[in-house]
Structure formats: structure tokens, C-alpha cells
Image: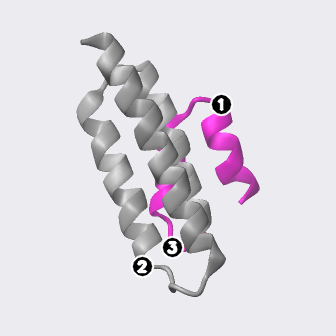
Amino acid sequence: MLLAKHAPATRDLETALEFARSESLSPIERVWIYTEAVDLIKTKKSRGNVTDLLVQAVTLAREMDSADPNRARALTAVALQLCVTSESLRNRI
């Protein structure tokens, strides 16, 4: 997980996405990486990929057990990222 946390901080999008796709991390860790990767993509102004990453994060979050408190955390993280992304997209138009 240490390397996975380091990838978004170094702005290395491809490495971060490799970790997010990895089954070795927990779902909440993978959702976190996807939501952090959205920030990396936004700096590159690639709108289509933002949606793809958020869909991946939502899919992972919804697969989590409904009794798992991390499910709510993951869905909240995605919702917050969506709000921020939608606002930044509106400002660009």
C-alpha cells in the first residue's frame, strides 16, 4: 500500500492505475487511488477518462458488503470527487 499511496503523490498516473487495478489492495484502497487519479487526469484536461475512473470507483464501492463502513466512505469519496469535477468542468465551458 505504501507504493500505491506514493504513486498519486508523484503524479505518476499509469503507476497509480496499475495499483488501482491490482487485486492485492483492498477495495477502499483501490477506490481511493481512482479518486486521486481523477485529480491527476483533470490537470491533463482529459474529460472522458475522468468519467471512466469514477465509474470504476463506483463499481468497486458498490461491490463492497453493505455492512462494511468503508462502503459508505468509498461512495462518499466518489460523490465528492464528482461534485468537484462537475464544478471544474462547468468553469471550463
Residue 1: give x, y in percent of width and height.
71, 60
The residue tagged 1 is 10
Q: Which residues are drawn in magenta?
A: 1-27
Q: Residue at x 53, y 56 (%)?
A: 76
Q: Earlier in the sequence, mark 3 or mark 1?
A: 1
20 in the magenta segment = yes
Other-residue count near label 2 (Cα within 10 Å), few / some / many at <14 / 14–19 / ≥20: few
The residue tagged 2 is 63
Q: Are marks 1 and 2 in contact (CB under 8 Å)?
A: no
Mark 3 vs mark 1, CA separation in Å: 22 Å
85 in the magenta segment = no
The residue tagged 3 is 23
Q: Nearer the viewer, mark 1 or mark 2?
A: 2
Task: Describe residue 10's horizontal placement relative to residue 88 as left or right.
Answer: right
Viewer-proximal residue among 18 and 69? 69
Mark 1 vs mark 2, CA separation in Å: 29 Å
Task: Look at the numbered disc 2 and give the secondary structure of its residue.
Answer: helix
**Residue 45 seen in render:** yes
- Res 88 → quadrant: top left
Residue 16: give x, y in percent of width and height.
54, 46
Task: Look at the numbered disc 1 and give the secondary structure of its residue.
Answer: loop
Q: Of the residues shown, which amino acid type is indicated by label 3?
A: Glu
